[in-house]
Image (tube, rainbow, N blue to C red):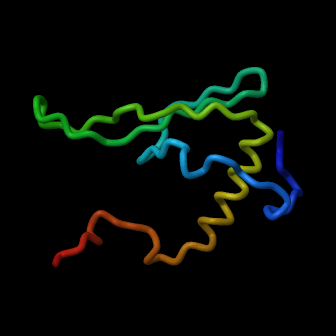
């Protein structure tokens, strides 16, 4: 069910601290069927056997298309508010 138009203070999300956390570096592949969108997220993994970095599936998000629209809108707002220094870059490692 979409939360569109509902102020964030009007609802509470239970179990946030207990929910699994997945580190992802991107998504590859999406399907939409009967109003349900599935996005396949991955992380890069180094394979010492091949000496290559490979994309490893981490999780699949299944979300109603209507709700995905709200999520994308919220993420767009978040991205618009990020400062350039908030976004990590490959060369921004701590050299201490």
Q: Which residue: 43% across, 77% down?
A: 85
Q: Quadrant of the C terminus?
A: bottom left
Relative to 21, 39 lies left or right = right
The relative height of residue 3 versus residue 91 in the rendered view (above or below) is above
The relative height of residue 1 versus residue 85 in the rendered view (above or below) is above
Q: Position of residue 59 (x, y in %)?
A: 48, 33
Relative to 47, 63 lies left or right = right
Relative to 37, 41 lies left or right = left
Which residue of the protein is positioned furthest toward the top in this rendering? 34
Q: Position of residue 32 (x, y in %)?
A: 68, 26
How many marks the image carries: the answer is 0
60 and 7: which is toward the camera: 7
Corner quadrant of residue 37: top right
20 and 31: which is toward the camera: 20
19 and 68: which is toward the camera: 19
Relative to 4, 43 lies left or right = left
The relative height of residue 59 versus residue 23 in the rendered view (above or below) is above
The relative height of residue 38 versus residue 24 in the rendered view (above or below) is above
Corner quadrant of residue 75: bottom right
Q: Position of residue 24 (x, y in %)?
A: 43, 46
Q: Which residue: 72% across, 27% down?
A: 36
Q: Which residue: 89% across, 57% down?
A: 5
Q: Quadrant of the N terminus?
A: top right
């Amino acid at each position: 069910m979409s939360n569109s138009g509902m102020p964030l203070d009007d609802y509470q999300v239970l179990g946030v601290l207990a929910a699994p956390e997945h580190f992802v570096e991107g998504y590859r592949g999406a399907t939409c069927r009967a109003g349900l969108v599935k996005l396949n997220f991955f992380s890069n993994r180094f394979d010492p056997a091949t000496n290559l970095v490979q994309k490893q599936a981490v999780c699949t998000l299944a979300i109603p298309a209507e709700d995905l629209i709200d999520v994308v809108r919220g993420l767009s707002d978040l991205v618009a508010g990020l400062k350039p220094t908030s976004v990590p870059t490959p060369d921004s490692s701590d050299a201490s």
